[in-house]
Image: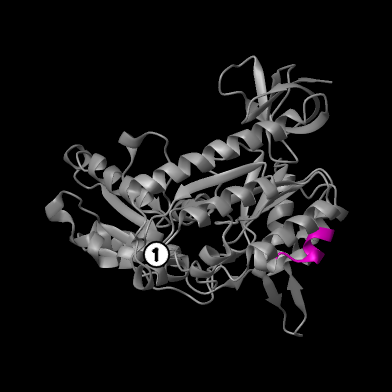
Amino acid sequence: MNFSDSEIVASVMTENNYVTTKEQNEADVIFLNTCSIRDNAEQRVMNRLKQLQPMRKKKPGLIIGVLGCMAERLKSSLLEEAELGLRVDMVVGPDSYRDLPQLMLDAESGQKAINIILSAEETYADITPVRFASNGVSAFISIMRGCENFCSYCVVPFTRGKERSREPQTIYIEAKQLFDSGYREITLLGQNVNSYVWEDSQSNKTHFPELVAMVATVSPLLRVRFATSHPKDLSDKLIATIAQYPNICNAIHLPMQSGSTSVLSRMNRKYTIDDYMARIAAIRTAIPDCAISTDIITGFSGETDDEFAQTLKAMEQANFDFAFMFKYSEREGTLAAKKYPDDVPENVKAHRLQEVIKHQQKMSLASNKKDVGKVVEVLIEGFSKRSKQHVSGRSSHNKVVVFPDRGFAPGQYALVKITSCSAATLIGEAQ
Protein backbone atom coordinates (compact mmCIF):
# COMPACT_ATOMS: atom_id res chain seq x y z
CA MET A 1 0.00 0.00 0.00
CA ASN A 2 2.86 2.39 0.79
CA PHE A 3 4.51 1.55 -2.53
CA SER A 4 1.25 2.33 -4.34
CA ASP A 5 0.85 5.60 -2.42
CA SER A 6 4.42 6.62 -3.33
CA GLU A 7 3.50 6.25 -7.00
CA ILE A 8 0.52 8.58 -6.45
CA VAL A 9 2.80 11.10 -4.75
CA ALA A 10 5.24 10.86 -7.67
CA SER A 11 2.37 11.57 -10.07
CA VAL A 12 1.21 14.64 -8.14
CA MET A 13 4.76 15.99 -7.98
CA THR A 14 5.67 15.35 -11.63
CA GLU A 15 2.48 17.10 -12.74
CA ASN A 16 3.82 20.11 -10.86
CA ASN A 17 7.20 20.25 -12.61
CA TYR A 18 9.21 18.04 -10.28
CA VAL A 19 11.16 14.99 -11.44
CA THR A 20 12.23 11.95 -9.44
CA THR A 21 15.89 11.09 -8.93
CA LYS A 22 17.67 7.96 -7.77
CA GLU A 23 20.57 10.04 -6.45
CA GLN A 24 19.97 11.27 -2.92
CA ASN A 25 22.48 14.12 -3.23
CA GLU A 26 20.56 15.55 -6.22
CA ALA A 27 17.32 15.82 -4.29
CA ASP A 28 15.73 19.16 -3.44
CA VAL A 29 12.83 17.38 -1.74
CA ILE A 30 12.91 14.08 0.17
CA PHE A 31 9.70 12.39 1.28
CA LEU A 32 9.66 9.45 3.66
CA ASN A 33 6.45 7.50 3.09
CA THR A 34 5.81 5.77 6.38
CA CYS A 35 4.05 2.88 8.09
CA SER A 36 2.86 2.70 11.70
CA ILE A 37 1.90 -0.97 11.87
CA ARG A 38 4.86 -1.81 14.12
CA ASP A 39 7.15 0.21 16.33
CA ASN A 40 10.15 -1.14 14.40
CA ALA A 41 8.87 0.56 11.23
CA GLU A 42 8.60 3.91 13.00
CA GLN A 43 12.05 3.58 14.56
CA ARG A 44 13.53 3.00 11.10
CA VAL A 45 11.90 6.24 9.93
CA MET A 46 13.31 8.19 12.89
CA ASN A 47 16.77 6.79 12.20
CA ARG A 48 16.44 7.73 8.54
CA LEU A 49 15.46 11.27 9.49
CA LYS A 50 18.61 11.54 11.61
CA GLN A 51 20.74 10.30 8.71
CA LEU A 52 19.25 12.91 6.35
CA GLN A 53 19.79 15.99 8.54
CA PRO A 54 23.48 16.56 7.58
CA MET A 55 22.36 17.06 3.97
CA ARG A 56 20.87 20.40 5.00
CA LYS A 57 24.39 21.85 5.38
CA LYS A 58 25.18 21.05 1.74
CA LYS A 59 21.76 22.14 0.50
CA PRO A 60 20.22 24.79 2.82
CA GLY A 61 16.90 24.80 0.94
CA LEU A 62 16.38 21.04 1.25
CA ILE A 63 12.83 20.08 2.21
CA ILE A 64 12.25 16.88 4.16
CA GLY A 65 8.70 15.58 4.53
CA VAL A 66 7.08 12.70 6.38
CA LEU A 67 4.09 11.20 4.57
CA GLY A 68 1.56 8.47 5.28
CA CYS A 69 0.43 6.66 8.39
CA MET A 70 3.18 7.83 10.72
CA ALA A 71 2.46 11.43 9.72
CA GLU A 72 -1.20 10.82 10.54
CA ARG A 73 -0.46 9.14 13.86
CA LEU A 74 2.18 11.53 15.25
CA LYS A 75 0.82 14.64 13.54
CA SER A 76 2.30 17.92 14.78
CA SER A 77 4.70 16.23 17.21
CA LEU A 78 6.91 15.46 14.21
CA LEU A 79 7.26 19.20 13.60
CA GLU A 80 8.39 19.71 17.19
CA GLU A 81 11.41 17.39 17.10
CA ALA A 82 13.92 20.05 16.02
CA GLU A 83 15.57 20.06 19.44
CA LEU A 84 16.30 16.36 18.96
CA GLY A 85 17.99 17.03 15.62
CA LEU A 86 15.00 15.73 13.64
CA ARG A 87 13.86 18.77 11.71
CA VAL A 88 10.87 18.01 9.49
CA ASP A 89 9.42 20.58 7.09
CA MET A 90 6.25 18.79 5.98
CA VAL A 91 3.84 16.34 7.62
CA VAL A 92 1.24 14.98 5.19
CA GLY A 93 -1.35 12.29 5.88
CA PRO A 94 -2.41 9.60 3.38
CA ASP A 95 -5.51 11.51 2.23
CA SER A 96 -3.71 14.81 1.57
CA TYR A 97 -1.37 14.08 -1.34
CA ARG A 98 -3.32 16.32 -3.72
CA ASP A 99 -2.31 19.25 -1.51
CA LEU A 100 1.42 18.62 -1.88
CA PRO A 101 1.99 21.49 -4.38
CA GLN A 102 0.45 24.07 -2.01
CA LEU A 103 2.21 22.53 0.98
CA MET A 104 5.49 22.75 -0.94
CA LEU A 105 4.94 26.51 -1.34
CA ASP A 106 4.38 26.80 2.41
CA ALA A 107 7.54 24.82 3.17
CA GLU A 108 9.62 26.78 0.64
CA SER A 109 8.56 30.04 2.30
CA GLY A 110 9.87 28.75 5.63
CA GLN A 111 6.51 27.81 7.13
CA LYS A 112 5.79 24.42 8.62
CA ALA A 113 3.47 22.56 6.24
CA ILE A 114 0.97 20.10 7.67
CA ASN A 115 -2.22 18.42 6.44
CA ILE A 116 -3.39 15.29 8.20
CA ILE A 117 -7.13 15.58 7.56
CA LEU A 118 -8.69 12.20 6.84
CA SER A 119 -11.26 11.99 4.06
CA ALA A 120 -14.34 9.80 3.73
CA GLU A 121 -14.24 10.07 -0.09
CA GLU A 122 -10.62 10.31 -1.30
CA THR A 123 -9.52 7.33 -3.45
CA TYR A 124 -7.17 9.09 -5.95
CA ALA A 125 -9.13 7.28 -8.67
CA ASP A 126 -8.40 9.97 -11.27
CA ILE A 127 -4.63 10.05 -10.65
CA THR A 128 -2.48 7.84 -12.88
CA PRO A 129 0.37 6.63 -10.67
CA VAL A 130 3.95 7.16 -11.87
CA ARG A 131 5.58 3.70 -11.89
CA PHE A 132 8.92 5.22 -10.96
CA ALA A 133 10.44 2.17 -9.24
CA SER A 134 8.65 -0.63 -11.08
CA ASN A 135 10.23 -3.59 -12.84
CA GLY A 136 7.93 -2.92 -15.79
CA VAL A 137 6.24 -6.30 -15.33
CA SER A 138 4.26 -6.10 -12.07
CA ALA A 139 2.20 -3.19 -10.79
CA PHE A 140 -0.15 -2.34 -7.93
CA ILE A 141 -3.64 -0.91 -8.27
CA SER A 142 -5.25 0.53 -5.15
CA ILE A 143 -8.95 -0.35 -5.30
CA MET A 144 -10.03 1.00 -1.92
CA ARG A 145 -8.70 2.87 1.07
CA GLY A 146 -9.24 2.76 4.81
CA CYS A 147 -10.45 0.02 7.13
CA GLU A 148 -13.31 -0.43 9.57
CA ASN A 149 -12.44 -3.80 11.10
CA PHE A 150 -10.81 -2.28 14.19
CA CYS A 151 -8.63 -5.23 15.12
CA SER A 152 -7.55 -4.34 18.65
CA TYR A 153 -3.82 -4.26 17.85
CA CYS A 154 -4.03 -2.22 14.64
CA VAL A 155 -3.64 1.52 13.99
CA VAL A 156 -4.82 1.43 10.36
CA PRO A 157 -8.44 2.56 11.00
CA PHE A 158 -7.05 5.60 12.82
CA THR A 159 -4.34 6.44 10.27
CA ARG A 160 -6.23 5.65 7.03
CA GLY A 161 -9.82 6.35 8.00
CA LYS A 162 -13.10 4.88 6.77
CA GLU A 163 -13.41 2.29 4.02
CA ARG A 164 -14.22 3.68 0.60
CA SER A 165 -14.00 1.96 -2.76
CA ARG A 166 -13.05 3.18 -6.22
CA GLU A 167 -15.44 3.04 -9.15
CA PRO A 168 -14.83 -0.32 -10.87
CA GLN A 169 -14.55 1.15 -14.36
CA THR A 170 -11.58 3.30 -13.30
CA ILE A 171 -9.86 0.18 -11.98
CA TYR A 172 -10.53 -1.73 -15.21
CA ILE A 173 -9.20 1.18 -17.30
CA GLU A 174 -6.04 1.41 -15.19
CA ALA A 175 -5.47 -2.35 -15.55
CA LYS A 176 -6.02 -2.13 -19.33
CA GLN A 177 -3.59 0.77 -19.62
CA LEU A 178 -0.98 -1.17 -17.65
CA PHE A 179 -1.40 -4.23 -19.86
CA ASP A 180 -1.16 -2.12 -23.02
CA SER A 181 2.06 -0.61 -21.61
CA GLY A 182 3.64 -4.04 -21.25
CA TYR A 183 2.76 -4.97 -17.68
CA ARG A 184 1.72 -8.57 -17.26
CA GLU A 185 0.75 -8.78 -13.59
CA ILE A 186 -1.30 -6.51 -11.38
CA THR A 187 -2.09 -6.75 -7.67
CA LEU A 188 -5.37 -5.25 -6.47
CA LEU A 189 -4.73 -3.57 -3.12
CA GLY A 190 -6.91 -2.85 -0.12
CA GLN A 191 -6.65 -3.16 3.65
CA ASN A 192 -9.44 -5.71 3.25
CA VAL A 193 -10.21 -6.27 -0.43
CA ASN A 194 -13.15 -8.51 0.47
CA SER A 195 -14.97 -5.42 1.76
CA TYR A 196 -14.81 -3.75 -1.66
CA VAL A 197 -18.24 -2.55 -2.81
CA TRP A 198 -19.27 0.12 -5.29
CA GLU A 199 -22.83 1.34 -5.68
CA ASP A 200 -23.76 3.27 -8.80
CA SER A 201 -26.48 5.90 -9.25
CA GLN A 202 -29.05 3.16 -9.98
CA SER A 203 -28.16 1.35 -6.72
CA ASN A 204 -26.43 -1.47 -8.61
CA LYS A 205 -23.62 -2.87 -6.50
CA THR A 206 -20.28 -4.32 -7.60
CA HIS A 207 -18.61 -6.52 -5.01
CA PHE A 208 -15.05 -7.81 -4.99
CA PRO A 209 -15.68 -11.11 -6.86
CA GLU A 210 -17.27 -9.20 -9.75
CA LEU A 211 -14.41 -6.69 -9.77
CA VAL A 212 -11.72 -9.41 -9.90
CA ALA A 213 -13.57 -11.13 -12.75
CA MET A 214 -13.85 -7.82 -14.62
CA VAL A 215 -10.11 -7.16 -14.33
CA ALA A 216 -9.33 -10.74 -15.39
CA THR A 217 -11.13 -10.09 -18.70
CA VAL A 218 -8.56 -7.42 -19.68
CA SER A 219 -6.49 -10.23 -21.20
CA PRO A 220 -5.77 -13.90 -20.48
CA LEU A 221 -2.09 -12.84 -20.51
CA LEU A 222 -2.59 -10.52 -17.54
CA ARG A 223 -2.08 -12.18 -14.18
CA VAL A 224 -4.32 -10.87 -11.40
CA ARG A 225 -3.46 -11.00 -7.70
CA PHE A 226 -4.96 -9.28 -4.68
CA ALA A 227 -4.11 -8.42 -1.08
CA THR A 228 -5.25 -8.62 1.61
CA SER A 229 -8.25 -10.81 2.44
CA HIS A 230 -9.93 -10.89 5.84
CA PRO A 231 -11.02 -14.43 6.77
CA LYS A 232 -14.45 -13.34 7.98
CA ASP A 233 -15.25 -11.93 4.53
CA LEU A 234 -13.66 -14.49 2.20
CA SER A 235 -16.75 -15.65 0.30
CA ASP A 236 -17.42 -18.86 -1.57
CA LYS A 237 -18.22 -16.66 -4.58
CA LEU A 238 -14.71 -15.19 -4.56
CA ILE A 239 -13.16 -18.65 -4.26
CA ALA A 240 -15.31 -19.84 -7.19
CA THR A 241 -14.25 -16.80 -9.25
CA ILE A 242 -10.56 -17.59 -8.68
CA ALA A 243 -11.19 -21.18 -9.74
CA GLN A 244 -13.05 -20.01 -12.87
CA TYR A 245 -10.38 -17.71 -14.36
CA PRO A 246 -6.96 -19.26 -15.14
CA ASN A 247 -5.25 -15.87 -15.01
CA ILE A 248 -6.42 -15.10 -11.46
CA CYS A 249 -3.43 -16.47 -9.58
CA ASN A 250 -3.86 -19.54 -7.43
CA ALA A 251 -2.43 -17.83 -4.37
CA ILE A 252 -4.46 -16.39 -1.50
CA HIS A 253 -3.04 -14.40 1.39
CA LEU A 254 -5.29 -15.05 4.39
CA PRO A 255 -3.97 -13.63 7.69
CA MET A 256 -4.61 -15.98 10.61
CA GLN A 257 -2.70 -13.93 13.25
CA SER A 258 -3.19 -16.60 15.94
CA GLY A 259 -4.31 -20.20 16.15
CA SER A 260 -6.07 -19.61 19.46
CA THR A 261 -9.74 -18.57 19.47
CA SER A 262 -9.31 -16.80 22.81
CA VAL A 263 -6.41 -14.74 21.44
CA LEU A 264 -8.39 -14.01 18.26
CA SER A 265 -11.23 -12.75 20.46
CA ARG A 266 -8.89 -10.37 22.30
CA MET A 267 -7.56 -9.28 18.91
CA ASN A 268 -11.17 -8.53 17.81
CA ARG A 269 -10.65 -10.57 14.64
CA LYS A 270 -14.33 -11.59 14.53
CA TYR A 271 -13.74 -15.28 13.71
CA THR A 272 -12.78 -18.43 15.59
CA ILE A 273 -10.00 -20.76 14.57
CA ASP A 274 -12.68 -23.22 13.44
CA ASP A 275 -14.14 -20.51 11.20
CA TYR A 276 -10.69 -19.90 9.77
CA MET A 277 -10.04 -23.57 9.07
CA ALA A 278 -13.43 -23.81 7.35
CA ARG A 279 -12.25 -21.11 4.92
CA ILE A 280 -9.01 -23.01 4.34
CA ALA A 281 -11.02 -26.17 3.62
CA ALA A 282 -13.26 -24.28 1.18
CA ILE A 283 -10.20 -23.03 -0.72
CA ARG A 284 -8.59 -26.47 -0.84
CA THR A 285 -11.84 -28.04 -2.09
CA ALA A 286 -12.43 -25.55 -4.92
CA ILE A 287 -8.76 -24.93 -5.82
CA PRO A 288 -6.81 -28.03 -4.72
CA ASP A 289 -3.37 -26.66 -5.64
CA CYS A 290 -3.93 -23.12 -4.32
CA ALA A 291 -1.00 -21.64 -2.37
CA ILE A 292 -2.04 -20.11 0.92
CA SER A 293 0.06 -17.59 2.82
CA THR A 294 -0.67 -15.90 6.13
CA ASP A 295 0.33 -13.43 8.85
CA ILE A 296 1.13 -14.55 12.40
CA ILE A 297 1.69 -12.46 15.53
CA THR A 298 3.42 -13.96 18.58
CA GLY A 299 3.22 -12.63 22.12
CA PHE A 300 -0.06 -10.74 21.90
CA SER A 301 -1.49 -9.51 25.23
CA GLY A 302 -2.05 -12.38 27.63
CA GLU A 303 -0.88 -15.12 25.25
CA THR A 304 -0.24 -18.24 27.33
CA ASP A 305 1.99 -21.19 26.51
CA ASP A 306 -1.13 -23.19 25.65
CA GLU A 307 -2.50 -20.48 23.35
CA PHE A 308 0.85 -20.30 21.57
CA ALA A 309 0.89 -24.09 21.20
CA GLN A 310 -2.51 -23.80 19.51
CA THR A 311 -0.93 -21.46 16.94
CA LEU A 312 1.75 -24.02 16.08
CA LYS A 313 -0.93 -26.69 15.77
CA ALA A 314 -3.06 -24.47 13.52
CA MET A 315 -0.07 -23.75 11.29
CA GLU A 316 0.40 -27.47 10.72
CA GLN A 317 -3.31 -27.98 10.09
CA ALA A 318 -3.48 -25.15 7.55
CA ASN A 319 -0.13 -26.17 6.02
CA PHE A 320 0.79 -22.68 4.85
CA ASP A 321 3.12 -22.23 1.89
CA PHE A 322 4.50 -18.97 3.21
CA ALA A 323 4.01 -16.61 6.16
CA PHE A 324 4.82 -13.12 7.36
CA MET A 325 5.70 -13.49 11.03
CA PHE A 326 6.04 -10.83 13.71
CA LYS A 327 6.19 -10.39 17.45
CA TYR A 328 3.49 -8.17 18.94
CA SER A 329 4.26 -4.46 19.04
CA GLU A 330 1.84 -2.36 21.10
CA ARG A 331 0.61 0.71 19.23
CA GLU A 332 -0.53 3.81 21.10
CA GLY A 333 -4.21 4.63 20.70
CA THR A 334 -5.39 1.14 19.78
CA LEU A 335 -7.99 -0.80 21.74
CA ALA A 336 -5.34 -3.29 22.85
CA ALA A 337 -3.15 -0.50 24.27
CA LYS A 338 -6.14 0.81 26.24
CA LYS A 339 -7.65 -2.50 27.32
CA TYR A 340 -4.95 -5.18 27.46
CA PRO A 341 -1.54 -5.03 29.15
CA ASP A 342 1.49 -5.76 26.97
CA ASP A 343 2.43 -8.45 29.46
CA VAL A 344 4.32 -11.09 27.45
CA PRO A 345 8.06 -10.53 28.09
CA GLU A 346 10.12 -9.52 25.04
CA ASN A 347 12.37 -12.58 25.34
CA VAL A 348 9.27 -14.83 25.33
CA LYS A 349 7.84 -13.01 22.29
CA ALA A 350 11.16 -13.42 20.48
CA HIS A 351 11.49 -17.11 21.38
CA ARG A 352 7.95 -17.83 20.20
CA LEU A 353 8.62 -15.92 16.97
CA GLN A 354 11.67 -18.10 16.30
CA GLU A 355 9.57 -21.21 16.90
CA VAL A 356 6.98 -19.97 14.38
CA ILE A 357 9.69 -19.17 11.83
CA LYS A 358 11.25 -22.61 12.28
CA HIS A 359 7.85 -24.28 11.82
CA GLN A 360 7.09 -22.26 8.71
CA GLN A 361 10.48 -22.92 7.11
CA LYS A 362 9.83 -26.66 7.39
CA MET A 363 6.42 -26.27 5.76
CA SER A 364 7.74 -23.94 3.03
CA LEU A 365 10.50 -26.42 2.18
CA ALA A 366 8.00 -29.31 2.09
CA SER A 367 5.70 -27.25 -0.15
CA ASN A 368 8.52 -26.46 -2.56
CA LYS A 369 9.72 -30.06 -2.64
CA LYS A 370 6.30 -31.06 -3.95
CA ASP A 371 6.98 -28.89 -7.00
CA VAL A 372 10.22 -30.67 -7.91
CA GLY A 373 9.61 -32.54 -11.17
CA LYS A 374 6.64 -30.36 -12.13
CA VAL A 375 6.50 -27.92 -15.05
CA VAL A 376 5.26 -24.49 -13.95
CA GLU A 377 4.48 -21.33 -15.89
CA VAL A 378 6.76 -18.49 -14.79
CA LEU A 379 6.33 -14.78 -15.48
CA ILE A 380 9.89 -13.49 -15.89
CA GLU A 381 10.68 -10.36 -13.89
CA GLY A 382 14.40 -9.93 -14.67
CA PHE A 383 17.83 -11.25 -13.86
CA SER A 384 18.41 -13.30 -10.73
CA LYS A 385 19.88 -11.30 -7.82
CA ARG A 386 22.89 -13.63 -7.69
CA SER A 387 23.77 -14.09 -11.33
CA LYS A 388 23.22 -12.42 -14.69
CA GLN A 389 23.38 -15.91 -16.17
CA HIS A 390 20.01 -16.69 -14.60
CA VAL A 391 16.59 -15.06 -14.71
CA SER A 392 14.00 -14.91 -11.98
CA GLY A 393 10.24 -14.81 -11.97
CA ARG A 394 7.19 -16.08 -10.14
CA SER A 395 4.74 -18.88 -10.63
CA SER A 396 0.99 -18.44 -10.30
CA HIS A 397 1.47 -19.65 -6.71
CA ASN A 398 3.70 -16.61 -6.05
CA LYS A 399 6.81 -18.77 -5.66
CA VAL A 400 10.15 -17.39 -6.84
CA VAL A 401 11.64 -19.49 -9.66
CA VAL A 402 15.24 -19.13 -10.87
CA PHE A 403 16.53 -20.73 -14.08
CA PRO A 404 19.26 -20.24 -16.72
CA ASP A 405 18.75 -17.35 -19.12
CA ARG A 406 18.21 -18.09 -22.82
CA GLY A 407 17.71 -14.54 -23.94
CA PHE A 408 14.43 -14.11 -22.08
CA ALA A 409 12.94 -10.64 -21.60
CA PRO A 410 11.03 -9.33 -18.58
CA GLY A 411 7.31 -9.85 -19.10
CA GLN A 412 7.72 -13.10 -21.03
CA TYR A 413 6.14 -16.32 -19.85
CA ALA A 414 8.24 -19.48 -19.72
CA LEU A 415 7.47 -23.10 -18.92
CA VAL A 416 10.04 -24.26 -16.39
CA LYS A 417 10.68 -27.74 -15.08
CA ILE A 418 11.57 -27.58 -11.40
CA THR A 419 14.73 -29.57 -10.63
CA SER A 420 15.52 -28.53 -7.03
CA CYS A 421 14.53 -26.05 -4.35
CA SER A 422 15.22 -24.34 -1.06
CA ALA A 423 12.61 -23.18 1.45
CA ALA A 424 12.39 -19.84 -0.38
CA THR A 425 13.17 -20.58 -4.05
CA LEU A 426 12.43 -23.04 -6.83
CA ILE A 427 15.29 -23.90 -9.22
CA GLY A 428 14.60 -25.17 -12.72
CA GLU A 429 15.26 -25.39 -16.44
CA ALA A 430 13.20 -23.73 -19.17
CA GLN A 431 11.44 -26.23 -21.42
- Toward the viewer: 332 or 49? 332
Q: Which residues are magenta?
A: 234-240
Percent x, y of residue 44: 33, 45
Q: Viewed as shown, does residue 169 lie left or right of 25?
A: right
Q: Position of residue 217 (x, y in %)?
A: 83, 55
Write the residue at 74% across / 46% down.
Answer: 180
Q: Nearer the viewer, residue 413 or 426?
A: 426
Point out the image quarter for the C terminus: top right
Residue at x 38% of width, y 49% of height: 41
384 is higher (above) or lower (below) than 136 = above
Residue 29 visible to an observer of this rendering: no
Residue at 51% from the left image edge and 63% from the top image edge: 263
Q: Which residue is mark 1?
A: 93
Seen in the picture, residue 337 relative to 204 is either above or below; the reply is: above
Mark 1: amino acid: Gly
Q: Residue at x 71, y 35 (%)?
A: 367
Q: Looking at the image, how many numbered discs can be counted on the residues?
A: 1
Q: Would you say residue 120 sits in the magenta stretch?
A: no
Q: Is residue 236 magenta?
A: yes
For the stretch drawn in magenta, what is the main secondary structure? helix
Helix, strand or loop for disc 1: loop
* Pick the front one: 364 or 107: 364
Above-or-below relation of 103 to 429:
below
